[in-house]
Amino acid sequence: MSAAHSPLPALLKQMTALIDADNYAEVAKAYATFVKEHPTTRFLASEPIPFKINIRLSNKYGSSATSTFTLRHTTWAEDVKKALNEGPEAFAALLATYDADVAEVAKSVKKVA
C-alpha cells in the first residue's frame, strides 16, 4: 500500500503567493475549491490563513502597526476565517478594509528599530 501525500502543502504555497500579491478574492476561491474537493480539511486549510495575512501586513506596514491593529481588533483572525467561508467577495472586502486600517495605524505608530 502506498502512502498518499496531502494536497494541503500545495494549497498553502498557492495561498501564500496569492496573499503576497494582495489577491484575496483568489485566495477565497482557491480555498472554496479545495474544501469542496477535500471537505475534511476545512480546518487545516483555513487555520494558517490569518497568520499568512499577518505576515503580509507586517511586511507591508511594519510589525508595530500590525500588533496595534491586532490589539484594537482582537477577533480579526476569526473574522477572516468567517469571511473566507462567506465567499470571495466578502473575504476580499474584509481584507481591503483591514489593509486600509493597518495602513492608517502605520502612520501613527513608532517604527521598531
Image: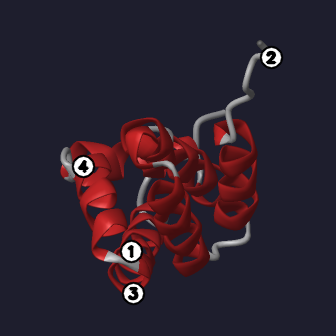
Of the two numbered discs 2 and 3 in the rendering, the one whose residue sits closer to the viewer: 2
Residue 110 in sight: no
The residue pinned by badge 4 equals 78
Please say if the residues under marks 1 and 4 sit with CB atoms less than 8 Å apart.
no
Nearer-N-terminus badge (1/4): 4
Q: Where residue 44 sits in the image (x, y, percent)? A: 46, 35
Indicate the amino acid at tag 2: Ser
Q: How many marks?
A: 4
Nearer-N-terminus badge (2/3): 2
Q: Where residue 96 sits in the image (x, y, percent)? A: 44, 80
Please say if the residues under marks 1 and 3 sit with CB atoms less than 8 Å apart.
yes
Q: Residue at x 69, y 66 (%)?
A: 18
**Quadrant location, the C terminus:** top right
CA separation in Å, label 4 and label 3 = 17 Å
The residue pinned by badge 1 equals 91
At numbered mark 3, what does the secondary structure look like: helix, strand or loop?
Answer: helix
Q: Where residue 103 sits in the image (x, y, percent)? A: 48, 70
Indicate the amino acid at tag 4: Glu
Indicate the amino acid at tag 1: Phe
Nearer-N-terminus badge (1/2): 2
The residue pinned by badge 2 equals 2
The residue pinned by badge 3 equals 89
Q: Residue at x 45, y 61 (%)?
A: 36
